[in-house]
Amino acid sequence: MIKQPSDTDLERIDAAFNRALAAEASARESVAACRVEADRLLADAEDHARRLVQRTDRRLLAVQQIADASLQRALSELLDRVAEPLGDGLDTAADARLNAAIDTLADEMIGAGADAAVGPWNRECGPS
């Protein structure tokens, strides 16, 4: 024979279900709160990363500007030294050799020597 639950049993079962439902609702609220907090933390991290990249870009630009200014100063000093006369101590032959060496070096630096090395060939169209 099957025993019928008493009213006390039904009340205890009801109370247990209600506690389980309340615990589930509380857990859902906690999960939702965690999602909101995770979204906030992610947004904060992305903002921090964006500011870090911007600060790094500003610093790199400043370093490049400092390097450019230093390079410009060094180049200017070098050009000032090159523009200074060498003096009258060179004889004509030494002066001619020095000028020829400077011309050859300049041709090498700008690639003019490569055109002369090609000879009778036109670089773009073959023999000239």
Image (tube, rainbow, N blue to C red):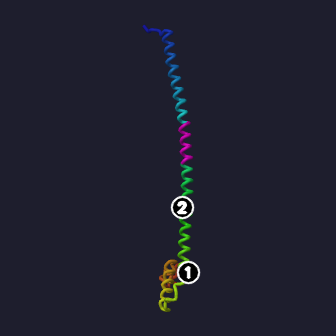
N-term mark: 1 or 2 = 2
Residue holding disc 1 = 83
Residue 34: x percent and y percent? 53, 34
Q: Does residue 38 show up magenta in the picture?
A: yes
Q: Does residue 41 show up magenta in the picture?
A: yes
User: Which residue is located at x 56 percent, y 36 percent?
Assistant: 36
Amino acid, disc 1: Ala
User: Which residue is located at x 55 percent, y 81 percent?
Assistant: 84
**Mark 2 neighbour class, 10 Å CA radius: few under 14, some 14 to 19, many 20 or more:** few
CB under 8 Å between callouts 1 and 2?
no
Amino acid, disc 2: Val
Residue holding disc 2 = 63
**Mark 1 neighbour class, 10 Å CA radius: few under 14, some 14 to 19, many 20 or more:** few
User: The N terminus lies in which quarter of the figure?
Assistant: top left
Q: Secondary structure at mark 1?
A: helix
Which contiguous range is marked in magenta? 36-48
- Cα distance in 3D space between marks 1 and 2: 30 Å
Q: Which mark is residue 111?
A: none
Q: Main secondary structure of the magenta part?
A: helix
User: Which residue is located at x 54 percent, y 61 percent?
Assistant: 63
Tell which of 128 and 119 is nearer to you.
119
Q: Quadrant of residue 61?
A: bottom right
Q: Is residue 50 above or below residue 85?
A: above
Residue 96: x percent and y percent? 50, 89
Count numbered badges in the picture. 2
Tell which of 99 and 1 is nearer to you.
99
Residue 8: x percent and y percent? 49, 10
